[in-house]
Structures are given as C-alpha cells and as structure tokens.
Image (tube, rainbow, N blue to C red):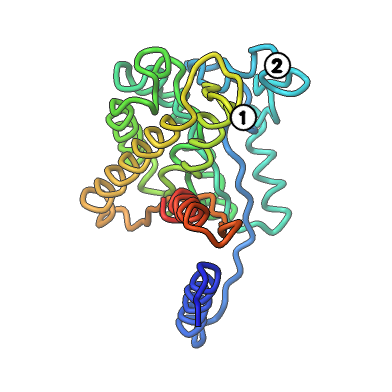
Amino acid sequence: MKVTVTQIFLLLLLSLVHSFAEQRSNEEEEVERSQFPSGLQIEGAVLEDGKSPNNWDVFCHIPGGIKNGDTGDIADDHYHQFLEDIEIIHSLGVNAYRFSISWSRVLPRGRLGEVNPKGVMFYSKIIDNLLLKGIEPYVTIYHHDHPQELEERFGAWLSPLMQEEFVHFAETCFENFGDRVKYWTTINEPNLLAEMAYLWGRYPPAHCSAPFGNCSSGNSDTEPLFVLHNMLLSHARAANIYRHKYQLKQGGFIGIIANTLMCEPLRDIELDREAAKRALAFYIAC
C-alpha cells in the first residue's frame, strides 16, 4: 500500500492531538481567548518619542506600495490610546494578548545606537496594565518591521549581519521586559516574510524577479532562501541565549511562529514530488 505525504502528515497530526489530549485528560481545561495584532498594524506615532522610521514606514509612502495609499502613520493610534484599548480587550473577556515590539521604537539605530527609554516605557506600561487586568502578555520580538537604517546599511535580512542585530534586540527585550513576560515569540512567520518580500515583492523591500514579479531589484530564486536562513539562525541564537541566560531566573518560554501550508504533488512524477518536498520544507520544516 502506497502511503502519501498527506497521510503521513495526518497521522503525525492525530498522534500529536492524542498525546495532548492524554496529557490534559486529568486536568481542568482552561480556555485562552486571545488577540494578536502587531505594533505596525495598530500603534501609529511613527516618529514620536524617539522612534526612527522602519522599513514599513518607508514602504507605505512609496506610491503604489499600499492599496489606496494607506500608511501606518496613525493606524489605530494605539500609542496614545493603549489604556482604552486594554479596557476594551478586558471587557471582551480576553485573557491573553499577543503583541509585537517595534524594533525602531526601542532601538532606533540598532546596535549602533542607544536604547530609547521612552520606547521601553511604552511597552512596560502595556505589559503592566495587561497584567493588572489579568491578561497574560505574549510578546513577539519581531513582526516584520525593523529600523530602515539596517536596510540601507547592509540589506537587513539579506546579510548575516542582521543576526547580530536581532540577537542584540532580543536581549534588550529580555532584559527590560522578561521579569513580567513569560511567553516569547522570536519571529512571526519568517517563511511568509521571505516569500512576500523577496519572492513576490509585495512587502518591503519589494525584491523579486521574473516570472514572480517585475521589481527593480531582487532574485526570487535565491533571496528568499538567504533571508529565511538568516532569520532561522537569528531565532536559534536568540532562543539559545534566552534558555541559557534568562529562562531560569525569569521562568518563561520561547518559540517561533511559522506560516504552515500542506503541499502535495500535482502529478505523480518525480519533478512534482520533489517540488512538493521543497515546499513542505519551506512551509513546515522551517
């Protein structure tokens, strides 16, 4: 009997669910109701209190970059209205809230500059007020936005130098927020960023090549792999530092969030089977 990739995937999934169910069978089940925006999507205040422009701030102002010319300059104005937002979240019965730290608000120039105390204070206030309302903060260190200076200096994720920058940023977050944050995500959906920014050219820095798009620069065959490689190594290094330097005294957990898809061969030929394997490696094994 021939076993397909789909059958293997489903068997693994069922095994995981069964294992989890057994683990929880004798425990009182607690349901977490959560929300998970990113700083870029809701904060606004793009140049206030020491924040520098990030890659999305610049991209949003390029004509045609975003539909209708929308920008994140104001967004939901969460930067000024976070207390009211937390009250609304609490009123909805939410007991877990995942949000991201804007890199350019905390470290406007990356490793070359100082920590921005007003940026640290902003996120500390969010964390403290969430905890006061009984809402567990889940913090994403990187949700696709970084100081534009890193893009201009060395190409950001296209360069191994970005690994050092990310580790420094992650440690800055652990040191300033780790006494209250117990759940960390290093990078949100690195494979999605690699695909959208460097294969299709729809996210900054808008790199792509034919037949995937008509960008002014980029290589859709190679750049997504370089970028994903650097992001995964950055995750591994930051997670290793947390587990060996901070986890024992802070008592938290750390992981990564991947954008997963199931892929099957279109035809039962070797070329399509190999293509499906590569796609699964990109979307699941990343």
From this view, report whether residue 61 is shown above or below residue 144. Answer: above
* Residue 156 on image: x %, y %: 39, 23
From this view, report whether residue 121 is shown above or below residue 229. Answer: above
* Residue 262 on image: x %, y %: 57, 59
From this view, report whether residue 148 is shown above or below residue 4. Answer: above
Left or right: 254 with respect to 213? left
Mark 1 crowdedness (10 Å alpha carbons): few <14, some 14-19, many ≥20:
many
SS at mark 1?
Answer: loop
Instruction: Pick out the residue farthest to the left.
Output: 244
Residue highlighted by disc 1: 43
In the rendered structure, which amino acid carries the disc numbered 2? Gly
From this view, report whether residue 140 is shown above or below residue 244. Answer: above
Instruction: Pick out the residue farthest to the bottom.
Output: 26
- Residue at the spot 52% in from the left edge and 71% down from the top edge: 4
- Choose the circle earlier in sequence order: 1 or 2: 1
- Residue nearest the viewer, comparing 24 with 251: 24
- Residue nearest the viewer, comparing 36 with 236: 236
Left or right: 69 with respect to 196? right
Does the CB distance between marks 1 and 2 fall below 8 Å? no
- Residue nearest the viewer, comparing 137 with 198: 198
As drawn, the label of residue 200 is: none
* Residue 205 on image: x %, y %: 52, 21
Left or right: 200 with respect to 219? right
Distance Cα–Cα, label 1 vs label 2: 22 Å
Residue highlighted by disc 2: 64
Left or right: 215 with respect to 150? right
SS at mark 2?
Answer: loop
* Residue 206 on image: x %, y %: 55, 22
- Residue at the spot 52% in from the left edge and 54% down from the top edge: 272
